[in-house]
Amino acid sequence: MNDAVQRPVVAVDAMGGDLGPEAIIPGTLKALAADTSFSIALYGDPAPIGAQLAQHDHDAQRVEIVPCSQDIGMGESPAAAIRGKPDSPIVRAMVDQKAGRVQAVVSAGSTGAMVATSLVILGRLASVDRPAIGAVVPTIGGEMLLLDAGANVQCSAEHLVCFARMGELYAREMLEVDSPTVALLNIGEEQKKGTELAIEAHRMLRESGVNFSGNVEGNVLLLDAANVVVTDGYTGNIVLKLIEGFGHFMGELAHVPDLDEAHRQAIRPILELLMKKYSYEVYGGALLLGIDGVSIIAHGRSSSRAITSAVRVAHRQVRLGIPAKLQSMLGG
């Protein structure tokens, strides 16, 4: 970086996502303007990045463009992309994080590529067999961390215990919950309910030392049932997308054709509140816990507001030293 003052650097994939630089650059610059304690590196095609930067006031001493000649498509094989596209923003940024040139990576591009490059290039923390995608979900009483939200389709009970331990620390440090509760997503509250995996995970979580509150059913997830909820990545991803889809459904209610104007006006304040407080844009993206670094996976359709949130979360993880604290807590 061309900054005389040593600041942590957040790498941003400027080309990723549905909206590309037109959303990513303004969102990144807004996060940068609100906090002078870090810098950014924008990875991608210099022409559109430069054009966007020229349209917005910013501190040029805290912004670097890292030219990349390749890009990873959303449908590409992550493994093939790592091998075949070393000059793509995601791969270049991860290599730079491994080398210490940047301290975090944010991308709204391919989730598979972000997970794969994080694992292959950054590596796992010692004692972590399976890193997990964590998603912060708004609830009636605050925030809930759901994990795994898609990294591991199949999990063992030991994996779920590791997720719980990582989630508990993250909730305490990042969500600022003094004594976070941890629950296991299941089809009933009873200890012996569910699959063999769920029954064994319940037993192990009770004995793990985490603040385990028991099983939790899907119908109470958003009612502040627990601060951390663990499940396998297959189930967690379905739950996360259902929650996101419900938010979209609520937003579309104002446009239902047979809704008369009086009712449309009556529900508008409620919908505006939902979009303001409970939109995915508030939280920016998911996080990959258990890797030796900071990797933020922003939503593919991220707006500039969502990118602002994602960059802020990335910088806060760096500032609080979340990977190092996870490693210390897990041992190894």
Image (cartoon, helix red, strand yellow):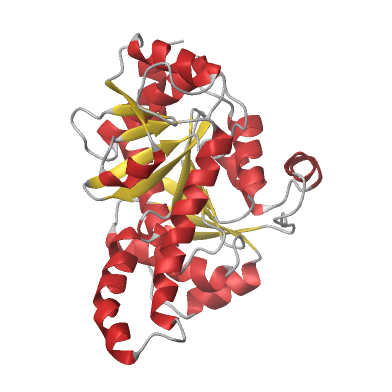
Residue most extreme to the left: 178
Which of 120/266 is in front? 266
State the image quarter where residue 78 is shown: top right
Residue most extreme to the bottom: 261
Q: Tell me, yes or no, if residue 82 can be seen here.
A: yes
Residue at the spot 54% in from the left edge and 45% down from the top edge = 238
Residue at the spot 70% in from the left edge and 52% down from the top edge = 88
Tell me where residue 60 appears, x and y as whole percent. 43, 66
Q: Is residue 229 above or below residue 273?
A: above
Residue at the spot 36% in from the left edge and 11% down from the top edge = 208
State the image quarter where residue 248 is shown: bottom left
Q: Is residue 51 left or right of residue 216?
A: right
Which of 293/223 is in front? 223
Tell me where residue 322 appears, x and y as whole percent. 37, 32
State the image quarter where residue 45 is shown: bottom right
Q: Is residue 74 above or below residue 173?
A: below
Residue at the spot 51% in from the left edge and 36% down from the top edge = 100
Q: Tell me, yes or no, if residue 126 can be seen here.
A: no
Q: Is residue 231 left or right of residue 273?
A: right
Which of 9/312 is in front? 312
Which of 48/254 is in front? 254
Tell me where residue 292 appears, x and y as whole percent. 51, 28
Tell me where residue 6 appears, x and y as whole percent. 37, 45
Query: How many labels sit on residues?
Result: 0
